[in-house]
Amino acid sequence: MNERTGGRAGGRPRGAGSAADGAVVAGAGGDAVSGRVGARRVLAYGPHALLVEVDDADGAAALASWLRAQGPPAEDVVPAAATVLVDGLADAAAHAAVRDAVARWHPRAGVTDGPLVVLEVDYDGEDLADVAALWGCSVQEAVARHTALELTAAFCGFAPGFSYLVGLPAALAVPRLATPRTRVPAGSVALADRWCGVYPTASPGGWRLIGRTDAVLWDPDRLDPGPALLAPGTRVRFVAR
Amino acid sequence: MRVTGAVTAPAAGGPAGHVEVLDPGPLTLVQDRGRPGHAHLGVPRAGALDPAAAALAGRLVGNGPDDAVLEVLLGGLVLRWGPVGAWVAVTGAPVTVWVDGRASSTGRAEWVPAGATLRLGPPPVGLRSWVAVAGGIAVDPVLGSRSRDTLAGVGPAPLAPGDVLPLGPRQAPPAPVVVPPGPAYDGALGVSAGPRADWLGRAGWERLLATPWRVGGGSDRVGLRLEGEPLARAREGELASEGVVLGAVQLPPDGRPVVFLADHPTTGGYPVVAVVVAEHVARCAQLRPGDPVRLVAR
C-alpha cells in the first residue's frame, strides 16, 4: 500500500508519528490525506497544497497545462521533473476539486503543441569540445546533433525564466561539471544529464556550456509571449549562426 | 490595546507625497502581499515575512490590503518626509519610533509633518519591523507586486541612502484599530508531515520533533536554517526536483533542516519531510541566530 497521510484530517490534530513511515491511515475529512487518485499518487503537502506524482517531466508539463485549463481553485500549478505541485488551496472543497480533476486526466489527454521558439546560437561554449568527446563525435557533428533536436520546456526553476528542456536522447546525456562555475553568462546554452537549458541571467552554474544566444529569456515587463520566453509547454529549436 | 489617532487627521484624498531615505539601516525592503501565481516561471512569491503584522501597520494608517510597506531588519531606518505630511505606523519587532526628537512606540499611528524625520531604534527582541505610510509605498510594481524577492532579485532594489519613495494617494483617514496582543512565543513551530516524510522514517520523524534546534546564522528571507544534531535519512538516492511550498521543511544531505520562507526557490531537489503551519511561518520573521526552535506535530 502506498497511501500516506499528513497534516490534519477532518479538522482534528493528528499525531504525526504514523505519518512518517508509510502507514495507511484512513482520513475522514479528506482535505489533507494522501492516496491514489486513479493511477496517480497524490501526496498531502501541508494544509494548502497537493503534490501529484507522474511518470516524467513530459507528463508533469502535460498535467500542469491540463489542470490550468480546468481553472483549478489554486494560486500556483508548478510542474517539475516528475511531479505537479498544486499550491494555494483554500479549503477541503478546493482539495477535492483538484483530486477530481487529477482523476479525470489521462497522460495523453489534452497534449497540445505549444508555441515554437527558434533560438539562434553561437556554438562556441567552453565545454563544447568536451561534450563532443562525451558524445564520441566531432564538434561539427555535435552542433548538428543539437540543432536537429526539437526540445520542449517542461518546467522552470533555479531562476526566473530558467526552463528545463526535455527531448535529449538518453545516448546524449552528459554529467554535470564536478565543480560548478561561479559565474555563467546570460544566454549560455547548456546541457546536464538529459536536460538542456539557457541561463536567463548571469549566475553560478554547473551545466556544460555549448553556446550562447542573444535572446532575452526573462523580461518581467514583457506581455507577449510573457516574462519567460520558454514557459512550460514551449517547443524549442536551436539554429547555428 | 486600543489605538486612537487621527484627531487632527487631514481629509482623505489629499495630495500624494514622498519620503527620502537618509539611512536604510542594515536592510530595508519594500514588501506587500507578494506575487503568487508565477512559481511555474521560477519566480518566488516574496511578500512580507509576517503578513498579519504588515497588514496591521497598513490598517493603522488607513491603507488597503495591497498597499506596500517597508520591512526593516534590526531597525536603523531613517526617512525624511517631503513637502506633504503623512501618518505612519510601525509593527513587528518593538522598536522605538522617533518622529524628529519625540519617541513613540510600535502599534499606533503617528502623524509625521512635512519635512520631519522618522527614525527607528534597534529592537531589543525580534528582528523585523514593518513601516506603513498612509497611501502606501508607491514604487512601480513588477509582475503585479512591489515586493522585493531577495533570491531571484525581482522587484524594487533594497533601499539605499538618497532613494526617494513616492507615496500613493491617501485612501482613508486612520481609524482606531484594536491591536490584539500576540501570543507569547514559546519557540514552538507546528508541523505536519511533508510529502517526503518517508525519507526520514518513523525514527527520524521522532528525532525531528525531539531535537532542540537552534536558528543558524545563515538564516534569511529564503529560509530559516536549523542547527542541531544532524538527522540521518532513512533511504538513499536522489529525488528529482519538485515544487516547494512556503513553510516546507527541507532536509539537505548535511541533515540540518531548512524551513523555507517567503523568498524560497520554487523547486528543490531535497526531500521535504515536514511543513510548518502557515500561522507559525510568520513567527520565523522574528527569530534570531541562536534562538531555540522546537518542531511540534500538529
Image: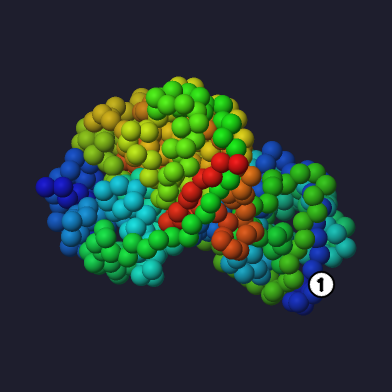
Can residue B262 be spotted in the picture?
A: no
| Viewer-side residue, A166 vs B156 | A166
Residue that appears at 68% across and 51% down: B156
Residue B111: x percent and y percent? 77, 63
Chain of the residue displaying label 1: B
Horizontally, residue B176 falls left or right of residue A141, namely: right
Give the x, y percent position of residue A239: 54, 45
Q: In this view, does A74 lie to the left or right of A37?
A: right
The image quadrant where one finds the N terminus of chain B is bottom right
Q: What element carries label 1?
A: loop
**Residue beneath the point at 39% across and 24% down:** A136
Image x and y of residue B283, in percent: 48, 47
- The x, y position of residue B184, in whole percent, is 47, 48
From what the image shows, is residue A66 above or below residue B189? Answer: below
Q: Nearer the viewer, residue A48 or B55?
A: A48
Q: Name the residue tied to disc 1.
A: B15
Return the residue nearer the eye: A132 or B205. A132
User: Where, by quadrant of the figure, is residue A13 drawn?
Assistant: bottom left
Residue at image x 62%, y 59%?
A: A222
Q: Which amino acid does label 1 sit on?
A: Pro
Is residue A15 placed above or below B237 in the rendered structure?
A: below
Residue B143 appears in the rendering: yes
x 14%, y 56%: residue: A26
Please state which of residues B230 and B113 is positioned toward the viewer in this rendering: B230
Describe residue B272's horizontal placement relative to residue B62 as left or right: left
Q: How many labels does the image show?
A: 1
Q: How many C-alpha atoms fall within 10 Å of the one at disc 1: few (<14), some, or many (≥20)?
A: few
